[in-house]
């Protein structure tokens, strides 16, 4: 078979291709059968959307209603340069700056 493959025989390469495809198909079928058998044995598993079976009536009571604030992070930054136009100041025609906040934080 290797001699025919090395000579470039197309029949051998097509045979190998079909062999690999067939092996994949057979293994897929065997895997599907095995998984189907395992799934059929799981007849006691059913999805539930409620937890009523697990709650004992009257066992859960909230007596304390309180929020706990754990962390606080405050950062301060300057609003902007007093000479910039975005902070409420402006330049007059003489070149002097008017307005602004005086460097508030």
Image (cartoon, helix red, strand yellow):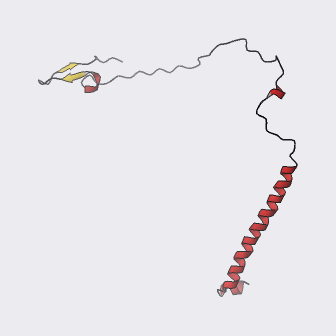
**How many marks overall?**
0
Residue drawn at (66%, 84%), measured in percent from left and top? 10
Q: Residue at x 29, y 23 (%)?
A: 87
Answer with the quarter of the image where residue 20 lies: bottom right
Residue 18 x, y percent position in the rendering: 72, 75
- Compared with 71, 38 (above or below) is below
Q: Is residue 38 left or right of residue 61?
A: right
Q: Residue at x 86, y 50 (%)?
A: 40
In the image, 70 versus 20, the foreground residue is: 20
Up the image or down, 102 lies above or below 95; here it is above
Q: Identify the image quadrant of the C terminus.
A: top left
Residue 93 image-quadrant placement: top left
- Quarter the N terminus occupies: bottom right
Is residue 68 in view from this perspective? yes
| Observer able to see residue 84 | no
Q: Position of residue 81 (x, y in %)?
A: 28, 24
As drawn, is 105 to the left or to the right of 45? left
The answer to which of 79 and 17 lies nearer the viewer is 17
Question: Quadrant of residue 104 in the image?
Answer: top left
For the point 44% across and 22% down, which residue is it? 75
Left or right of 26 on screen, residue 104: left
Image vertical order of residue 81 relative to residue 7, above or below:
above
Residue 92 at x, y percent in the picture: 15, 23
- Expressed as whole percent of the image width and height from the top left, the position of residue 101 reads 28, 17
Front in this rendered view, residue 6 or 65: 65
Say if 44 sits above or below 31 in the image: above
């Amino acid at each position: 078979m290797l001699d025919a493959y090395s000579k470039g025989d197309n029949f051998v390469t097509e045979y190998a291709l079909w062999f690999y495809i067939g092996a994949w198909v057979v293994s897929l079928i065997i895997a599907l059968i095995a998984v189907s058998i395992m799934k059929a044995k799981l007849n006691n598993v059913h999805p539930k959307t409620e937890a009523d079976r697990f709650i004992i009536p009257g066992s859960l009571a909230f007596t304390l209603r309180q929020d706990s604030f754990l962390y606080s992070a405050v950062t301060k930054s300057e609003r902007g340069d007093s000479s910039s136009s975005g902070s409420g100041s402006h330049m007059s025609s003489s070149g002097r700056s008017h307005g602004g906040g005086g460097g508030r934080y």
